[in-house]
Image (cartoon, grey):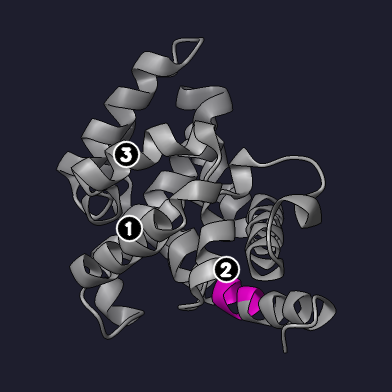
Amino acid sequence: MNFLAHAYLSFDRPKVLVGNFIGDFVRGNLEQQFEKEIVTGVLLHREIDSFTDSHPLVKEAQTLLKPVFKRYATVITDMYFDYFLAKNWHQYDERSIENFAQWVYGVISAHKEILPEKFQYPFKYMQKENWLVAYGTMEGLQRSFTGLSYRTAFDSKMEKAPEFLKLHQDKFENYFNPFFQELILFSKTRLDQISQKNGKL
């Protein structure tokens, strides 16, 4: 999943949010690097990604994308799903997505001293361009995919991903809705389990 989903699936626990956000940017012995609640977030991030990558509905969605986008189908699916989460935010949270995004940016900024260097650069632009809110618009998706296409080693065609979504939006949303409900339940359960193991509950 992409950043907005990982933020939402941290369930308003600030340090879990930090760990969940930096999960792709850390390696090695986590316990030696971070306090327990942040380690919990990193482990939750990995559980979320594993659940997502193996889910049949996600694999079906990627099957539609692979003939055009090949190896980049996974990244595109993640961003499509953040689009649907942002677009339908009111179904998942009573706060506005704008207020939620500002809360997230504030929490992450408050932990700047422990953020991995490789994460600090994208986070700077995430705040500046308000990615978490922008994911819910076609214009925001277009900016994100165009930027990613410039940074890929191969011809990713990712700049065409928003147009592909417009053509198949109902189909992808029908994949997202039941999958995300399952992911919410899975994430709550795994967060409780990881927290208990780490002595936080």
The dominant secondary structure in magenta is helix
- Label 3 sits on residue: 124
Q: Residue at x 40, y 59 (%)?
A: 110
Above or below: residue 120 compared with residue 111: above
Q: Nearer the viewer, residue 65 or 187?
A: 187
Give the amino acid at mark 1: Tyr
The residue furthest top is: 154
- Horizontal side of 13 relative to 141 (left or right) equals right
* Magenta segment: 182-187
Looking at marks 2 and 3 on the same chain, the residue that comes earlier in the sequence is marked by 2
Q: Which mark is residue 16?
A: 2
Percent position of residue 108, x then y: 41, 57
Q: CA distance from mark 2 to mark 3?
A: 20 Å
Looking at marks 1 and 3 on the same chain, the residue that comes earlier in the sequence is marked by 1
Figure label count: 3
User: Few, some or many C-alpha atoms within 10 Å of disc 1 (few <14, some 14-19, many ≥20)?
Assistant: some
The residue furthest front is: 113
